[in-house]
Image (cartoon, rainbow, N blue to C red):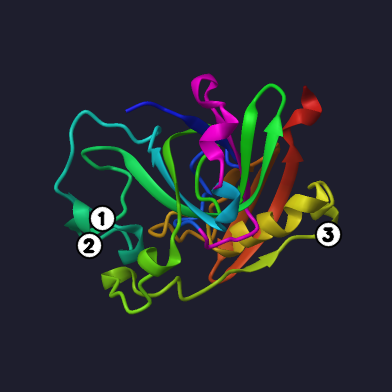
Amino acid sequence: MKVIAKIHTEFPTKFGIPRQSGIIESLRGSIVFEPDYRNPDAVRGLEDFSHLWLIWEFSEAKRDTWSPTVRPPRLGGNTRKGVFATRSPFRPNPIGLSSVKLEKIEIDPKLGPVLYVTGIDLMDGTPIYDIKPYIAYTDSHPDAISGFASKPAEYLLEVDCPETLLQHVDAPLRDSLVAVLAHDPRPQYQDDPNRVYGMEFGPYEVRFKVNDLNLTVLEIKNTTDSI
């Protein structure tokens, strides 16, 4: 298996990344091919497709051993399911699968074809093994049964972020940041109203508390200001 590309996103760490692709449509990423694969001919015709499948590596979840069961966050982290009945990153082979929307393709003089996508759920720098077009008539199954994950999260948090703090964030990223917070970036088994959580989003460090269904942003700091 060869890494053909890497994706660049606003998530330098795993914390806060949406649990599935497409949940937050405004989240953007750019896919840059590795030098051996920067041939524009390799993406000829790809612009005719609206969505893509990305096959990638859980590069931060590698283990020497594996467990036949895992504890899905959706079930509160207390119930075990077979690893092949989940999308847990802790698998015999650390391979992920995401469906994203292709916004545009640009040919960069140095980087070759760069794919701009939305609806991402990947960490910055994630290695990509393959890119395939999404084909609606075969890949979409509206009547599919989805087991314990048959419904999206049943709640969104009410985000209280003072305008004075939100102004520290570049305008194009504000809506995406608020959406990430509203989808509750905490591990689903944590529910301490006094705990202060920290999350990195692009060049920003965001600190917040959650009480019941209310998330209060305490601080937004641009980490590049001190460089």
Q: Above or below — where is 136 with respect to 154?
A: above
Residue 19 horizontal side relative to residue 116, left or right: left
**Residue at 63% across / 36% down in the picture?**
114
Marks 3 and 2, how far apart in space?
40 Å
Q: Above or below — where is 93 with respect to 195?
A: above
Residue 149: give x, y in percent of width and height. Answer: 33, 69
Residue labelled with disc 2: 79
CB atoms of marks 1 and 2 within 8 Å: yes
Q: Amino acid at mark 1?
A: Arg
Residue 225: give x, y in percent of width and height. Answer: 80, 30
Q: Secondary structure at mark 1?
A: loop
- Residue 213 position by quadrant: bottom right
Q: Is the residue marked by circle 3 packed among few (<14), some (14-19), or many (20+) residues within 10 Å? A: few
**Residue at 79% across / 54% down in the picture?**
166
**Residue at 26% across / 71% down in the picture?**
147
Q: Amino acid at mark 2?
A: Thr
Residue 102 horizontal side relative to residue 170, left or right: left
Residue labelled with disc 3: 163
Answer yes or no: is residue 197 visible: no
Indicate the quadrant containing the N terminus: top left, top right, bottom left or bottom right. Answer: top left
Residue labelled with disc 1: 71
Q: Earlier in the sequence, mark 1 or mark 3?
A: 1
- Residue 43 position by quadrant: top right
